[in-house]
Amino acid sequence: MAAAGTPYTPSPHRAPATRTLAFTAFAVTIALAAWLPPAMPRAHAEPGKGVEQRVTSLEAQVSSLQNTVGQQASQITALGNRAVADEAQLAALAAGSPAGGVLAQGGTPEVVPNATFTRVHYNLETYDDGNSFNPATSRFTAPASGLYAFHSAVAVTPGGGGEVLISLWKNGMEWQRGTRIASQPDRVTGITVSASGKLTAGDTVEVEVFQNSGASVSVEAGPVENWFSGYRLY
């Protein structure tokens, strides 16, 4: 310690230590300034509000995704149902259930009385895949429910006038009518019918002819002119 009255003189060894402490404090200040994040803007002064908004947005997105997934699930279900139906149809085709296709032809003449519906007989079978046609009765019986198509042609001998028509009968009642024209007195009259419709297994279909010439006429014998075809579409 200096004697009383002697001016204070800093120690030459203290100056470097002071400068070192000052430099260290400055360096720490710079480091902290670089490390600490900038001050948050005023809009973020309430962090809880921002989180709530974010959660609300996420909930809306989740709800939208759930709706999309629900719609896609419905579409997948519909496609699955369609696939099952298609598989059933394919299985039916593979099993031969649509069989029932028949081609039968007329081989003998028959009389058609005046003003009377008369069944046409086709007693010559070319094929009958599903055993659905009975040549003795000329009646087609549906082997399974579905959509069927039928075609038939008949040749009628010359009449004395009036009309002649052909129709398909289902379960004993007229179902689909075909050609209806004036009977020709000097030549054969050809008439045809083509139709399709839904049948239930066991339903019957046959061909009938009507004429009102005033006298009996005949259906000509001939497999080319008189024939019947029926088959299941699906």
Image (tube, grey):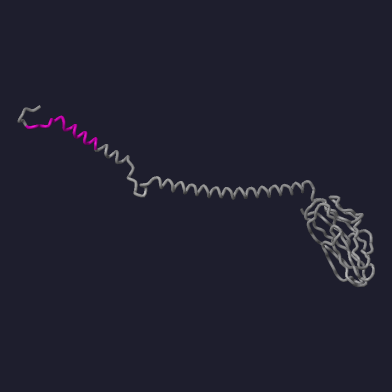
- Return the residue found at the far left: 5
Give the answer, above or below, for where 94 lies relative to 15: below
- The answer to whether 144 is drawn above or below residue 193 in the figure is above
Quarter of the figure with residue 212: bottom right
| Figure disc tally | 0
In the image, residue 126 above or below residue 22: below
Q: Residue 135: where, in percent of width, then height?
A: 90, 54
Instruction: Say if the magenta span includes residue 19.
Output: yes
Residue 112, position as x, y percentages in the image: 93, 65
The x, y position of residue 66, in whole percent, is: 55, 47
> Is residue 14 left or right of 34 when viewed as pictured?
left
Q: Quadrant of residue 6?
A: top left
In the rendered image, which quarter contains the N terminus? top left
Q: Is residue 196 magenta?
A: no
Span shown in magenta? 7-25
Q: Main secondary structure of the magenta part?
A: helix
Q: Residue at x 83, y 54 (%)?
A: 203
The residue lying at 9 percent from left, 32 percent from top is 8
Residue 29 horizontal side relative to residue 74, left or right: left
Residue 88 in the image: x percent, y percent?
Answer: 73, 47
**Left or right of 145 on screen, residue 72:** left
